[in-house]
Image (cartoon, rainbow, N blue to C red):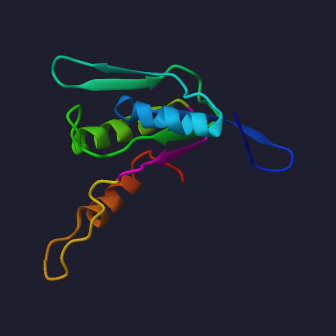
Amino acid sequence: MLNFISEMQFVPMDLFALNATQEFGAKVAAALGVELAPHEEREFEDGEHKARPLVSVRGHDVYLIQSLHSGPEASVNDKFCRLLFFISTLKENGAQRVTAVIPYLAYARRTDRRSHAIPLRPAISPCCSKLPGPTS
């Protein structure tokens, strides 16, 4: 799939969906008339994991689908870490631009106005902006 940048330039585009959101990602890909780009996710005995694209993303616009809704297969925090790690891997592999598509964004709710607590989203935004994360 190509993404139109200017009259003269087309940028290759890839669409990934991590395993926890694979079914939804397949529906999105079908609606767009494209295939999901292949990737590998591995679990290790100590709870660590790794994920990597199985196609070159160098110079591509990459869209990554990952819902952060908690479920029996993975917690919100696990899904969030996997999202950040895979974004980092895509950037390290030369993706021109990475856009995270997050249909359910956990931690986005506001706190009660009477509460003195700071919502998590504003608290982590400065931290996450320093990560090699999405460019859109």
Percent coordinates x, y for residue 97 in the rendering: 58, 44
Residue 90 seen in render: no
Q: As displayed, is residue 128 above or below residue 114?
A: above
Using residue 5 as the reference point, say whether residue 67 is left or right of it: left
Using residue 75 as the reference point, say whether residue 12 is left or right of it: right
Nearest the viewer among 17 and 97 is 17
Quadrant position of the N terminus in the picture? top right
Using residue 118 as the reference point, say whether residue 85 is left or right of it: right
Percent coordinates x, y for residue 2 in the rendering: 72, 37
In the image, what residue occupies the spot 51% across and 36% down? Answer: 27
Percent coordinates x, y for residue 85 in the rendering: 36, 36
In the image, what residue occupies the spot 19% across and 81% down? Answer: 113
Q: Residue furthest right?
A: 8
Quadrant position of the C terminus in the picture? bottom right
Residue 134 seen in render: yes
Q: As displayed, is residue 10 above or below residue 116?
A: above
Nearest the viewer among 99 and 22 is 22
| Quarter assignment of residue 12 | top right
Percent coordinates x, y for residue 126 in the rendering: 35, 61
In the image, what residue occupies the spot 21% across and 40% down? Answer: 75
Q: Residue furthest bottom?
A: 114
Residue extent of the magenta highlight: 94-104
In the image, what residue occupies the spot 63% across and 32% down? Answer: 34
Q: Check if residue 99 falls in the magenta segment.
A: yes
